[in-house]
Amino acid sequence: MISHQFPVLIVVTPLILSFFVNVVGWWDKRYCVPIVFVALSVSLFSAIGALEAVIKHGGPIHYHLGNWQPPWGIEYVIDYLNTPILVAIAFISILVLIFSQRSIEKELPESKIPQFYTLFLLNVTGLLGITVTGDAFNLYVLLEIASFSAYAIIGIGERGADFSAFRYVIFGTIGACAYLLGVGYLYIVTGSLNMADLHHLLPKLYYSRAVLVGMAFFLVGVGIKMGIFPFHTWMPDAYTYAPSTVSALLAPLFTKVGAYVMIRLLFTIFEPSFSIKLYPVAEILGWIAAAGIVFACVMALAQSDLKRMFCYLIVGEMGYILIGIASANRLGLTGAILHIINDMFMMACLFTVAGAIMYKTGDRNIYRFRYLHRKMPITLGVFVVGALSVVGVPPMCGFFSKWYLILGTIEAKKWILLGVLLASSLVNAILFFRVIENAYLEPRGEHAFAHDGGHPSISLDEVPWSMLIPMLMIAAGIILLGIFSGVIIKHIIQFAVPASF
Amino acid sequence: METVHSATPLLAMLASLIGAFLILFTGERNRNLREFWTLAAAVIKFGLIASMLPYILHGKIVEYTIVEVYKGLFLQFRVDTFGMIFALLASFLWIVVSLYSIGYMRDLNEHAQTRYFFCFALAIFGAVGVALAGNLLTLYMFYEILTVATFALVAHKETPEAIKAGRKYLAYLLTGAAFVLFSMAVTYYLTGTLDFKPGGFVAGHGSREILSLVFVTFMIGFGSKAAIMPIHEWLPSAMIAPTPVSALLHAVAVVKAGVFCCLRVILYVFGPKVLSDLGLWIPLAFVVSFTVIVANIIALTQDHLKRRLAFSTINNLSIIILGAALVSHDGIRGAMLHIPFHGFMKITLFMCAGAIYVKTHKEFISEMEGIGKQMPITMAAFTIGALGLTGIPPVCGFISKWYLCLGALEAKEIIFLLVFLASALLDAAYFLPIIYGAFFKKPKFVKDHFDEASFFVVFPIVITAIGSIFFGLFPDAFMHFFKLAVASAKNIMGMGV
Amino acid sequence: MISKWEDLIIETLCRFLIPFMQTYSLYVLVHGHSSPGGGFQGGCIMAACFILLVIAYDLNEAKKRFKEKINVIFCSLGVFIYAGTGWACLLLGGNFLDYGKLSLILPTDPIKARYYGMASIETGVEITVMAIMVSIFWDLVTGGKHEEALEEENARADCK
Amino acid sequence: MLEQIVSRYNYWIYIILILIGFYGMMAKNNLLKKLIGMNIFQWALILYYVSIGAKKGGTVPILSEEAGSPFEHLKAIQCVNPLPHVLMLTAIVVGVATTGIALALLIIIYRRYGTLEEDEIIEELRR
C-alpha cells in the first residue's frame, strides 16, 4: 500500500521534518542532523521505490494529490526521466549532510545551526519537488522554495556572500518570473497547467504566436536558474562565497535540476516536433552551448580560486547538457540525461573536496596547495577521481556521458559542437592537472636526492572520517556509474528519451 | 575461431590493480612489504597471462565481457594472438623492471617511492589492459589510464625540467587522445561496432573521404604515443624521468602501447585490404620512413646517452609501423616480432644506462670512456643490446629485421627495403662508438674507479641480455612469440603460411 | 518600540480592539472555504493583533504574553497540522490530502469530511502565517538581534 | 492598430510595468532601488495574471447555499476565472518571501559595508 505513496513521500517527508528540525534544534542542536538524515533517508528509500515501480510498471505513474483528477488537481508524475534524478538528488544530499556536520560547526555560529539545517532540508525538498511534480505552476512554487532557501544559506557565507546572494535574489527572481510568464502564456491559450494535459492540447496550437512567446520566456527563465552561459553571472560569486557545505549541496544539484526542467519543457510539455523541427530552438541552444563552453573554459583558466574555477566548470557542464539537447537525437539526449546524473556526482565530488581543503587549510588558492598531498592524501585521491572524470578519462562516469554526446553531435552532423566538446575536455585537462601538479609535485633543485631533502616536514592531517566517508562514497559512485552506465541506459534512460527520436 | 569464456583476463588485470592499492596502503611504513607486493603482483599477473597461452596457441580466443555499454558496445577483454604478444612482453618485463627499480630506487635513495611504485603498477595495469582489450572502447579506457599514470612517473624528479616534461607529455598525449576519441566515435557511428576483427571491420562503411579522415586522425592520435616524427617531441624530454621509468616508457608500456594501438588500427580496424584499396598505406609509410631516417640522424648528434637511446626508440617504433603499413605477410610478422624483441633489447640498454648512472652519476657518452673495464657485466649486456638493435645475428633483433626486409621485398617496395637497411646502418653508426669508447679507450680521469652496481640492478640486466640472445637463437621458445606472430599474420592476411 | 511608551488612550483602545480582531481573524478562517478569506488572511490579521500590542505597550510586555520560543513552535505546529492532515489521509488509505478518506474517522460523509479536512488545513496555515509574520516583525524591530537587543535595552533602562 | 492597443490595455500596462521594473533592477545603483524594481516586476506579473482571469460583468465563483441548488444559479460563463487569482495568492506569498529575504540581506550588507550603493560595495569587496 505504501508503495503507491512513494511520489508524495519523496517530497512531503523532508518538508514536514524541516520544520521539525527547527523546533527540535531550539532545544538541542545535536538532534538536527539525525532528523535531517531520517528525512532524506525516507526520501531516498521512496525514490528508489519509485524507480523500481516505474521499471516494473514500464511507464509513467501518476499520483493525484488530494485525489483531485488532473488537469484540475496537482499531479505528481514519476517516470523514467525523473526517477533516476530523484535517486541521485536524495543520495547526494544525504552524503553532503554527513559531510556538512563538521564543516558547518567550523564555519557557522552555533546558534544558527538549526536554522541552517531547516533551510538545507527545505532546499532539498524544493529540488525533489521540482523533479517529481507534473504541474507547471507547482513547479514554479517548488522552484521558489528551493531558491529561497538557497538565497538564505548562501547569504550566511564568508565576506562577499551577502552581496552575491543579493545579486542571486535579483537574477533568480527574474528567472522565476520569466518562467511564470511562460506558464501564463500557455495558460491563456490552453487553460491548463498540467504538463501531460499541455502536451495533448498544445500540438493544435503550435502555430500560435503566444505559444512561441511562452516558450521563449520558459527558456530564459529556466536558463537563468540553470546558469547557462549568458545568464550565468550570478553563479560564480554565489557558489564561491557560500559556506563550503552549501556550495557542495547547491552546485551539484540546483543547476542540474534546472537542466532537468529544460528537458521536461522541451520534450514533455512541448513535442520535439515543435521545439526542434518547427522552430530552430535546438540550433540556438547549440550555439549558446558552444559559446558558453568556450567562455567557461577561458574564464576557468583565469581563476586561481579553486571553488570559482569549479563554478565556471559548471557553466561548461551545462553547455554539455545543452549540446546533448541541441543535437536532437536519441544518442545526444541519452548523453544529456546521463550527464545530468553524472555531473551531480562529479560536482559533488569536487565541491566536497574544496570544502575539505577549506576545512583544513582555510585556503582555496590553488597556487598555495603545495605539500597538500602529504597532509590530505585521501582527499586529494578523491579529487583526482573527480578531476579525471571531468576530463573524461574512462572508466570514470564523465567519459561515458561525453561519449554519447560526441556520438550525438556526429549523428546530427554538428561538427562545430563536436570540436568544442573535444577541445573543452583538453582545457579541462589543463585546469585539473594544474591543480594536481600544485598539490602533488614538490619542485626541487636539480640534485636533491636525499629522501625528503630540504623540505618542511608536513605530517598527515586529514579531515575527520565524517567528511572522508561521504567523499569516498561519491568517488566510488563516480567509478561505478561509469562502469555500469550501460546498465543504467539499457534499463532506464533509453525509455526516458522521447519515442519520436 | 573458437571462443573460450573465462575470467582469467579480468583476474590478470585485477592482480596489478589490487597490487597497486596494496602498495599505496602499505606506503613508506614497511618498504620491504611494499616491494613484496610489487613483485607478487607482477609474478601473479605474468602467471595468469601465461596460463592463457595454451588456449591462444590452439587458435582459440579468450573472452571476458565486463558490462555492456550500449548496443553492440561492450567493456570487454578479448585475448588474441597479437594481444598475447604484448601482454606477455609487458607482464614479463614488469617483473624484471620491478626488480631493477627496487635496486635503483634504493641505491639512489629516491623520494616518493610509494607513489612511484603505485603509478608503475597502474601503468602496467593500463598497458596490459591495452593488450587484452577486445574493442576500441576498452582499449581507449586503458590507454587513458596508462597516460595519466605515466604522467606522475615522468614528472617524478620534480625538478622544473621534469615538471615541464610532464606537462609536455600530457599535452601531446591528451590531444592525441582527443583525436582518438573523435575517430572512435565516427567509427562507431559508421559501423555500429568497435570490436577488433583480424583484417578490419570498416570495409564497406562510409565514403572514401571519411574513412581516410578517420584513419588520419587515428594515426595522429595513437601516433602521438608512438612518437611518429612531427609529434615525437615529448619523448626525448621525458628522458628526465628516472631510468626505470624510461625503460618502462620505451621498452614496455607507453610507446609500445602506442605502436600496439597503431597496429591494432591498421590491421584490426581498417585491415590490409581497405588500406591498399584507399591507398592509405603509402602516406603512412612515407611519414614513418621519414621518421626512421631523421630520428637516426638526430641520434648521431646526441651526447646524452638516454637521449640517444630515445631517438633510437623513435626509429624502431616507426620501423614497426612501417612493417605493418607495408601490408605484406612477412612485414606484419616482422613488425609483430619486433615489438617484443625490441622491448627486450631496449630495456637492456636503458637499464645499463641506469646502472651507469647509479654508480657514476654520468649521463653523457663522452664521459663514459673506459667504463667497460670497470663495469664489465653491464657493458657486456649493453653490447648485446646494441648489436641486436643493429641487426647482427644471433641476437633477436636480426630475426625481426630479417622479416621486415622480407616484407618490403614481398610488397615489391625497394625504397622501403632501403629504409630498413639504412636504419640498421645508422644504428650501427651511433651504437658502435659507445661500445668502442667504453672498452678500448682510456678513462679521462684515472682516479675514477667504480664497481658493478648492486645485485638488484645487475641481475635484471643479465636476464634481459641473455633473453635477447636466447630469443635470437630460439625465437619460438618459452613464450612462443614467433608462433603467435605467424598466427596473427595468417589471420590478418587470411591465408595459409 | 522596544522601550515603553506609556499612553493610556492607546493602551485602552488596544485592550478593546484586540479581542475583536482575533475573533474576526477566526471568522475569516472559518469562512475561508465558502467566501473570500482563509488561513492566510486570518493569520495576517492575527499577527496584526500582536503587532498592535507591541506598538501600544512594548516588546517586554508582549514577550510576557507570547514568548519567542512558543512562536517558533507555533511556526512549525501549523505545518504539522497541515501535513498531519495529509498524513492522516495517507494512513487511511487515500492519497496525500485526500480529505474524503477522513470520513472513516470523522462522523460524517466524505463530502463533509472534505470540508473538515480543509478547515483543519486552513487552521494550520493560519497558525504558521501568524507565527511567521510575528517573527518577521520581531526581526525588524530588534534589527535581527532578538533577545540580545532586548537585554541591551533593559540594561539601558535600568541604568536610567 | 490603436484599437488593438486600447482593447488589450491590460497587457500594455503589464508590459510597461515590467519594463520599468526591469530598468530599476538593471540600471539603478542603489540596492534598495533594485529591490523596489524587482517588486514592481513581480507585481506587474501578478497584475497580468489577475487580468487574464477577469471578465466584464463576471461575478465571484462562490456557491451560495441560500439560493437553492447552486448549480442552477452559477453559470461558468458569468464568473471570473478563479484559477489565475488563486495562483496569484501563491505568487504573492512568494513575492513577499523574496522581498523579505532580500531585505534581510540588505540589512546584513548595510551593517557590513555601511552602504547600499553597488559600486561602493564592489570597491569595498575588491580591497
Image (tube, coloured by chain):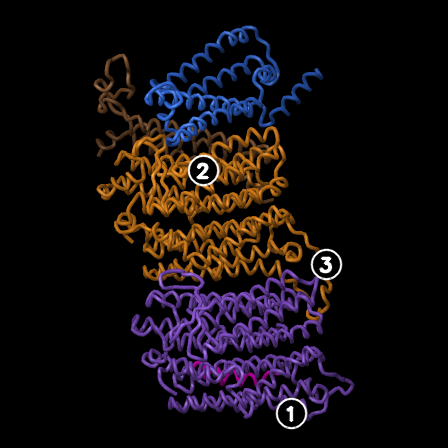
Chain colours: A orange, B purple, C blue, D brown
Is residue A112 visible from the viewing direction of this image?
yes
Q: Residue furthest right?
A: B447
Is B359 magenta? The answer is: no
Check disc 2 and report the residue beneath it: A126
In terms of secondary structure, where does tag 1 sit? Answer: helix
For marks 1 and 2, give the CA distance: 79 Å
- Tell me which amino acid carries mark 3: Pro
* Callout 2 and callout 3 share a chain: yes
* D89 to the left or right of C51: left
Tell me residue A282's x, y (percent). Answer: 32, 52
Is there CB contact under 8 Å for labels 3 and 1? no
- Name above or below for residue C42 compared with residue B182: above
Quarter location, residue D46? top left
- Range covered by the magenta-colored residues: B286-302
Chain under label 1?
A: B
User: Disc 2: which chain?
Assistant: A
Mark 2 or mark 3: name the one nearer the start of the chain: 2
Pointer 3 local density, CA inside 10 Å: few below 14, some 14–19, many at least 20: few
Q: Nearer the viewer, mark 2 or mark 3?
A: 2
Residue beneath disc 1: B436
Please state the total of marks drawn on the protein image.
3
Q: Which disc, if any, is residue A456?
A: 3
Q: Nearer the viewer, residue D20 or A471?
A: A471
Give, as a three-letter code, the residue at label 1.
Tyr
Quadrant in which the C terminus of chain B appears: bottom left
Asked if marks 2 and 3 touch (Cβ < 8 Å), the reply is no
The answer to whether residue A38 is above or below residue B427 is above
> D115 or B313: nearer the eye?
B313
